[in-house]
Image (cartoon, rainbow, N blue to C red):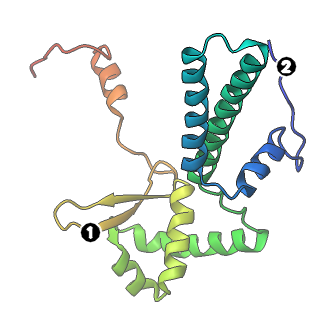
Amino acid sequence: MTPAVHVADGADPPDADLARWVDGTGATAPRLISGGLALAGLAFVAALMFPALGLAGTIALGSAFTIGGGLAFLGVRKLQRERVPAAAPALTPQRRALMHERSRRVVPVLSGGSVTFDHLMTQLRWTEQALVETLSFMKEGNLVVEDLDLDTGEWVYRLHTAELGGRAGPTLAERQARLGLGSGSTSETTA
């Protein structure tokens, strides 16, 4: 059983040195993986072809196998780190206040129902960047729902009514419970 590792706020995680080293290497992730697997495979094949290498041969092939596996592992780690997007920086208090004020101004325009991005820009007379930032902030806060209008093919935005104090219609689970149907029931009822 391994003990849990607690990382204090602002401190580096236990594998930060390894991650920095892997990121600092000149080799790309696919090269590390393929080179490691090739070295480990070569050591494995050599061990099969020459079983009587003695102690020195066993140590050399075992080391080559271990190093190859390690390189492949590091290549996988580097590949994973390259694919993970960087976390968005936290908003400063001033920026958060700005986003809340912008959101407050967007709500009346959205209260009429689903609205396109262009309609929002026309109504608010904002720059595209300001509107994108505000809608992203509102979407992350579950205040706005982005949906594709299948009739027009345009993305539309509407208020998330449950978050704004309104009552959304009952969910499918709530309807099933009201009708006395189990979650897995397929029985049909006639009205």
**Residue furthest left as drawn:** 190
Q: Secondary structure at mark 2?
A: loop
| Residue drawn at (13%, 17%) of the image | 189
Residue 77 at x, y = what percent? 64, 42
> Label 2: how many residues lie within 10 Å, few (<14), some (14-19) or many (20+)?
few
Residue assigned mark 2? 3
In front: label 2 or label 1: 2
Residue 89: which disc? Answer: none
Q: Is residue 63 left or right of residue 110?
A: right
Residue at 71% x, 73% y: name it. 95
Point 78% across, 68% down: residue: 93
- SS of the residue under disc 1: loop
Looking at the image, tell me whether mark 2 or mark 1 is earlier in sequence order. 2
129 versus 182 height, above or below: below
Mark 2 in CB contact with mark 1 (< 8 angstroms):
no
- Give the Cα separation between the discs numbered 2 and 1: 52 Å
- Measured from the top left, where is residue 49 in percent x and y? 54, 17
The residue to which callout 1 is attached is 154
Q: Which picture quadrant has residue 190?
A: top left
- Where 13 falls versus 66 (above or below)? below
Which residue is painted at 47% across and 48% down in the image? 162
Q: Nearer the viewer, residue 41 or 108?
A: 41
Q: For this view, does 7 lie left or right of residue 29? A: right
Q: Left or right: 90 with respect to 185?
A: right
Q: Residues within 10 Å of mark 1 (few under 14, many from 20)?
A: some
Q: Amino acid at mark 1?
A: Glu
Q: Say if 40 sits above or below 18 in the image.
A: above
Q: Classify residue 48 as left or right of residue 123.
A: right
Residue type pointed to by label 2: Pro
